[in-house]
Amino acid sequence: MKPIAVASKAVRKYIMSHGEKASFRSPAPLLARGVFDAVDKPVSDRFTAGFGKEKIIPPDLFKKKYYIAGYGPYKPATGILDLPFAHALWLDDNTGRGAVVFVSLDVVGFMNIDVERVRGRLAAFCAQTGCRSVNVMSTHNHAGIDTMGLWGPLPRTGKNKKYMEIVFAAIDKAVRKAYEDRRPCAAWLGEIEVEGLQEDIRLPEVYSKTLTRVRFVPDDGSREIYWINFAAHSESLGGKNTLVSADHPCYLRREIKKAAGAETFYCVGAIGGMISMNNDTESPETTMKLGRDLAGFALAVRNETKLEPVINILRQEFYAEADNSALMAAARAKILEAREYGLGWASLGVGLKTEMSYIEIGRLRLLLLPGEIFPELVYGGYLDADHSRAAGRDGGRGAHRRHRPGQRRNRLHRSAQRLFA
């Protein structure tokens, strides 16, 4: 047996032993069932929306080591191409139930334990302003600073506590700016098929080409807000890059601001396994062009429909089985910061607590999921056992299968309904 296999087996045995003890001594507590905060009809004919942003860059970037996250470990940042930000969207349907806050971060990922910290820091503000929900997401940016811990000088964590304080403070400021920016508005939903900008680099070839845009138009004619969702990794700069950047979403935002005067709140869809931007070269110039090209599609959305001002939310915490012994070992070594829970039914005996949220904004349906879900789990089109084996033998050349979202668009919606039922 090869040394790596021996080490892997030993690590797995250690995690399983720990999991058995944890599930016996301190089993995971039962989680409360989520309550669907919903109304059927709007009270007002207007939303209230506001936008805020704050940069997330350390002032001592050139004096201390901060690690670019998303590819291999130990890649210290050497400069800045553009500034990553925390963006916040304040949204209220004026039904009297309170506002909802969405935060989008130009980082590779954000641990659930840190989402809880964000909510804790904003608790007094939310009580004062009547905010009923805070939701944090990442653009899955592969050119930002490590916020998870996996990309540092292993076996030490790459997650810098002082930098995390900068991120937390930026989120707080962005949310408060969004609150101060709020104004009555109409919300217009539209979408467009994006051709030629994505690729699925692993089989099966399944992904959505749809760019979805919600355009918030203030009654006073002031600056609009674009909320854009698109399925692609933010990794156009490539694995050799050492410059801090927000990757192509930065240049999408800049182009929209230049062309329409609007601020942009950007988030990603189903991108796992693995949906990337289709670029021939990995360079700042290519990244900038991809962002501008994607903005061109976002600006070309037509045939919009008006959204009714109703925001309904169902948030459910759940335990996810941890079956990756290497990542659980990283958690045990404090490389990753995550709380472990004893789960007798799990293969390693342990799991992590996370959450998902189902949100209705008028007729728009959103499902906020942890991690980066595989599109074939959302839309269908995954390989069967025989084709999966063929893909493993020949790299997928004999198992090519393409599927585009169509009649099965509501598959994930139905699955979520079963989970929340």
Image (spheres, grey):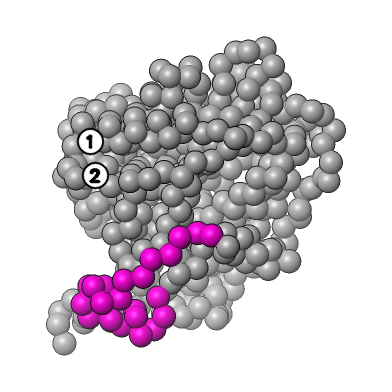
Q: Amino acid at mark 1?
A: Thr
- Classify the position of the N terminus by image quarter: bottom left
Corner quadrant of residue 7: bottom left
Q: Is residue 257 left or right of residue 100?
A: left
Q: Which residue is mark 2?
A: 279
Q: Is residue 4 left or right of residue 326?
A: left
**Depicted 317 relative to depicted 250: above or below:** below
Give the x, y percent position of residue 388.
34, 79
Q: Residue furthest front?
A: 303
Q: How crowded is the residue under tag 1: few (<14 C-alpha within 10 Å), some, or many (20+)?
A: some
Q: Is residue 1 visible?
A: yes
Give the secondary structure at mark 1. helix
Give the secondary structure at mark 2. loop
Give the x, y percent position of residue 142.
30, 44
Q: Is residue 384 magenta?
A: yes
For this rendering, which residue is in front, 196 or 342? 196
Q: Which residue is mark 1?
A: 286
Q: Amino acid at mark 2?
A: Asn
Query: Which residue is drawn at the image coordinates 28% and 59% (left, top)?
Result: 201
Label disc, if present, on residue 351 of the rendered structure: none
The residue range painted magenta reads 383-406
For this rendering, which residue is in front, 159 or 79? 79
